[in-house]
Structure formats: C-alpha cells, structure tokens
Amino acid sequence: MNEPEAFRMEAIVQPLLTWYDRNARVLPWRENRDPYRVWVSEIMLQQTRVETVKPYYERFLRHLPDVRSLAEIPEDELLKLWEGLGYYSRVKHMQEAARLICGSYGGSFPDTPEELQKLPGIGVYTAGAIASISFGKPVPAVDGNVLRVAARLTESSRDIAEAETKILLTAALEAVYPASRSGDFTQSLMELGAIVCTPNGEPKCTDCPLRSLCRANLHGTQALFPVKSEKKPRKIAQKTILLLRCGDRLALRKRPSGGLLGGLWELPNLEGTKSPEEIRTWLSAQGIVPEKIVKGKEKKHVFTHVEWLMSSYEIRCGECGGEFVWVTKQALDDEFALPTAFRKFLAAERKERA
C-alpha cells in the first residue's frame, strides 16, 4: 500500500476544480462566502446530513443574520431555534464564540486558522474551511469525506481515525493548494466525497474526475478503503420517562448544566426501568399524588457514545405540583427546546390521536 505523501497530489487539482465548476450542488451556504454564513453551515453539518441541515440553516439565518445577533439572543431562544438538530453543545459553543468575536475582535471574524482555532467550538477542520472558503487562505479542511477520497486515491492502509493520518494528508494537500482558488478546492474535495466517492455502497467511479489517477479504481480495491479502526461499543442506559399531565399541561424540568444535553429541558425521568410502585413512591417525594399511572411506549435513542433504552408512563395528576414547569402544548411548540429523545414520545402520541 502507498502513503498520501508518495502520491502526486498536484495532479488532482485542475481536474477536480474543472469538475466542481460543472457539478457543484446549489446550496444555501454557497450563495456567498461571508465567514458567518460559512461558519454556521460547517457547524450544522457536523454529524448531520445536508438535506436535514438546509431548512434549519435558512431559518437560523432569518432569525440571526449576523454574528452580533447570535451573541445577543437569549440562550433558551437559541436552543429552541436549534431544536431537532441535536448535539446542542455545538450551538452553545457558537454563541460563546460569537460573544468573543464581538468582544475581542470588534465583530469581525479573524482570518487565520490559528486565530480561528482560539474560538470555542472551532477546531482544525472548521478553521481550515472558514480560512480557505471565506478568506482564500491555502489551508486544507480535512474531514471524513476528504480522508476517504485520499485513502482510495492512494490506496493508503493508514487508519483514518488516527490523528497522524490527518496530519500527513493535511501537509500533502497544503503543498498543492491553488492560491487563487483555495476555497473552491476545499469545497471540491468535500463535494467529491459527498456525492461521488461515497461512504456507503459502491462509489460512483464512472462519474469521478480523478478515476484515471485513483489507485483503488485501477486495482478494483475501492471496498477496502478507507481503513478505520472499529469504534468502541456504545454504553447502554435504561431510562424510565414520565409524561406527567395536569389538565392541558405537561411537566418539564431542566437538566443540569454539565454533561449530556446539559441545560436543556426534558421530560422527568428516572434511571433504570421502574415499576408503577417505584414511580408512585418517587412522585410522592416530589409532592405529587398521581391519579392514574398507565404504561406507555418504549423508545430507543442513540447518542454518539451512549444508547438510551426508554420505557415510559402516562401519569395523570390532579394538581400541578413539584419542582417542575408545567407547560401547554402551544408553549412547548413555541418556547421550550425539547431534545429529540423526549419528543419521540410526544410525536408517537400525536400520531395515534391524528
């Protein structure tokens, strides 16, 4: 097997740019190269599909058209705007970064990858994307798509999950970056990995502008690359979700600020799989006497490192007591950001009533 640094990387530049000029998808964040717009798109696209991101991106920009508006919006409103995208720490870091940009950089984005990486939530990849696309710096942005393209081009047996692999590829690309079209080159590499040199199923090699240069295509070894070490299995956590209702109101509470889904609203829940008797005892300690407890749906939700197996109970309460916030359906829809793991139960319930 060969290494990226032994491959004539300069040979890919012109064919890839020519292909990109003809085949680039029309995407809302490509309408201009404003660093705020590029930044928002790159953060949203982390671990989220393009088609999912599009409507969220457009809504986000309508409400928060610039970095100052992001810095100033109340956190609860911001989280509601983000609701459904998941990985809420992303948008919290965005607001921290926006406030730093407004406070320390006069409201203007820094234009070097080194300065960009000083902002919360911006790592090497995102800094490279902003620096090259918005400011024309010859700086690579190496993500999973680019790593996969390079691994097949070079038939590299290096593990793409290892930091050294990314460092070597970044150096190899940096040496051939076209100074006059750095942003287009960054996006052309991403685009090739997204729509041609795809991760699942057969890559579309007949559509690839680099097929004559690609060693995996030459040898028919596309399925062997990239090499990636197996992830550790996710932890399994059992949860009992409580849908506490009092009249037309539903009980919510806020999660602790740290950890998974920190600071977000949630349906009250208990660790483990609880019986109605255990739930009744817990509710009594909260000052709530349930009128009725009925077994509800079971759901599963997968996070990056943990998987929740959730059972649920519908509980009718005579009084809106305890240390909960009791909200109407309208308020829940308009004001409170409820993570998808909990909204699944409400969505199932509404579907049944439809």
Image (spheres, rainbow, N blue to C red):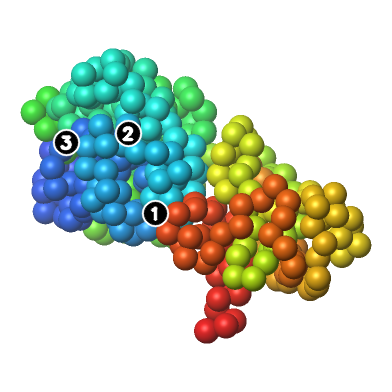
Q: Nearer the viewer, mark 1 or mark 3?
A: 3
Image point 45% across, 44% down: which residue? 76
**Residue 271 vs residue 213: left or right?**
right
First along the sequence among labels 3 and 2 = 3
Q: Position of residue 141 (x, y in %)?
A: 31, 31
* Quarter holding residue 64: top left
Q: Residue furthest left?
A: 180
Q: Nearer the viewer, mark 2 or mark 1?
A: 2
Q: Which mark is residue 49?
A: 1
Q: What's the amino acid at mark 3?
A: Asp
Q: Residue furthest bottom?
A: 354
Q: Position of residue 310 (x, y in %)?
A: 72, 59
Q: Position of residue 123 (x, y in %)?
A: 40, 26
Q: Position of residue 162 (x, y in %)?
A: 52, 28
Mark 2 residue crowding within 10 angstroms, few (<14) / some (14–19) / many (20+) = some
Mark count? 3
**Between 339 and 160, the one nearer to me in the picture:** 339
Q: Which residue is mark 3?
A: 34
**Between 135 and 326, the one nearer to me in the picture:** 326
Mark 3 residue crowding within 10 angstroms, few (<14) / some (14–19) / many (20+) = some
Image point 30% across, 40% down: which residue? 40
Q: Which residue is mark 2?
A: 72
**Residue 54 vs residue 133: left or right?**
right
- Give the vertical position of 139 relative to 275 (above or below): above
Q: What's the amino acid at mark 1?
A: Arg
Helix, strand or loop for disc 2: helix
* Quadrant (top left, top right, bottom left, bottom right) of the N terminus: top left
Residues at marks 1 and 3, CA–CA distance in whole angstroms: 22 Å
Residues at marks 2 and 1, CA–CA distance in whole angstroms: 28 Å
Residues under numbered marks 2 and 1 in contact, where contact means CB atoms less than 8 Å apart: no
**Between 354 and 190, the one nearer to me in the picture:** 354
Q: Nearer the viewer, mark 3 or mark 2?
A: 2
